[in-house]
Amino acid sequence: MFAPERYAELRRCGHLHERPLFSAQRSPGELELQARWFAGNFGRRFTSVTGEEIEIVQFGTWNREAGPDFSDAVVRCNGNAPARGSIEFDLTDRNWETHEHATNPAFEETVLHVFVHASERAFFTRTVSHRNVPQVRVDLATLPESFSANVPLAQPGRCQAPLKDEAAPRVLGILEAAAQFRLQRKAKRLRKIIEAHDRETALFQEIAGALGYKQNKLPFTLLAQRLPLKLLHARAKETEALLFGVAGFLQTPDLAAFPEDTRSHLRTLWDCWWKSADEMRRLVLLPDAWELSGARPLNHPQRRLAALAVLVQEWPAFLKSLGNGDAAAIRAFFVSLRHPFWNHHYTLASAATPAPMALIGDSRAADILANVIFPLFAAEGREVWPDYALLPAQLSNRRLETGAARLFADDPRRADFLRTVARQQGLLQIYEDFCLPDNSDCAHCPFPEQMQKWR
């Protein structure tokens, strides 16, 4: 098995790559045309509406969340240096304005606007900063008649060829070496936070960030910094109200508009928060700090904030669960957290659900173990790898699936390669080190050659 030091050496040995995406389901209209675009049916070279020569170096990743249709794309204009950013695909050129992309900060990094039908009058495709985005019109007449709905999640990379011929133990060794490297790097970062503050502050901030998921990691971290654990413990009865108030979720409410059970809980929070609102006004996050679209209702930041409030209240029990480092005991603590209101509500404004919902489910508990608890133990000098390596994988995510498609394509061993959290973490490390930084659509990625040398 490769040691993390060998993976670190591989990581230093070259320069790096990225590309693709999410499967399209066959349906008429814009979705099918986006799938054909991503499949390359329209080609890779175009002339923009103003005469620039446009080359698609990488089609990017199909974005299934709010924002442009394709992210992490690479486009070359007039033979100049490639530009990385997003691509938006619309049926008509005017959709850029009618869909309000021009005033949406999520579209600021767009490097190309693709459309099918042109309006009578030309116009600039501008961003919030008034930057003009090149436009390309695609011709439906150039499409082949037949279309397969099986557009791949991502196009296989050059690394897929050498990896598919490798014995499974060697592939797993590479993944686990990358995972150990990633674990050590996280431990080092946690150690710095502990040195700057203390163990419990570091734990609180890191768990808060983990509860924020990728969309809201920053605002959750800011909340943990602006409302430190010691302050929340000193004002234990106000914990939930303070967190929701500083998050900006307790603006003056019209309680009559809410269901009775929601109204009662909101009134309790508001009655507590208004006493502190003036003293903490400068700490309150602005509304645009939160990403509220594109997340499953179970993952709404208000539910995760409630989970953080319950964790603060159960902090002594949490520290006790860390005990001898038993992953099962720590996981059991997280999934056991309960709240009489939030076990049955998605948000402060939602109606109650008949069945209870976990505040922190198995998948989020596994994520906290992998990204916070085990790195903490490693930072403290504990031997964690044997237990870490056994953590079963939970839910996947877009980046993980994209990396798997790039490295393993349709390799029948793919599911087994990603069966544990450690192997998933290793794949993410490889994807981030060798896929994302590359602008050559795999052509200049050193990973395949390094694998050959390491035989």
Image: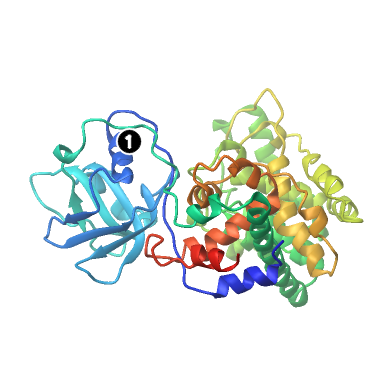
Left or right, 391 with reference to 262:
right
| Residue picked out by circle 1 | 31
> What x and y, as percent, mark residue 240?
72, 49
Q: Judge whether 80 appears above or below 112 on screen.
A: below
The residue at the far left in this view is: 120
Q: How is the image coloured?
A: rainbow
Tell me the kind of residue under disc 1: Leu
- Residue sitting at x 56%, y 75%: 12
Percent position of residue 112, x then y: 27, 56
* 291 horizontally vs 217: left or right: left
Residue 227 vs residue 170, the one in the foreground: 170
Looking at the rendering, in which quadrant would you find the C terminus?
bottom right
Find numbered disc 1 in the image and state the secondary structure of the residue it sits on: helix
Residue 230 shows in this picture? no
Of the 4 image quadrants, the one containing the N terminus is bottom right
Residue visible at 82% across and 53% down in the picture: 387
Identify which residue, 161 or 407, lies in the foreground.
Answer: 161
The answer to whether 420 appears left or right of 408 in the picture is right
Residue 36 position by quadrant: top left
Count of all numbered marks drawn on residues in the image: 1
In the image shown, does 214 or 21 lie closer to the viewer? 21
Residue 448 to residue 424: above or below: below
Query: Seen from this angle, which residue lies furthest top?
Result: 354
Q: Is residue 250 visible?
A: yes
Residue 324 position in % (x across, y down): 91, 56
Q: Is residue 90 above or below residue 257?
A: below
Q: Residue at x 51, y 46 (%)?
A: 292
Q: Position of residue 172 (x, y in %)?
A: 67, 53
Which residue is nearer to you in this view: 219 or 23? 23
Q: Residues within 10 Å of mark 1 (few under 14, many from 20)?
A: some
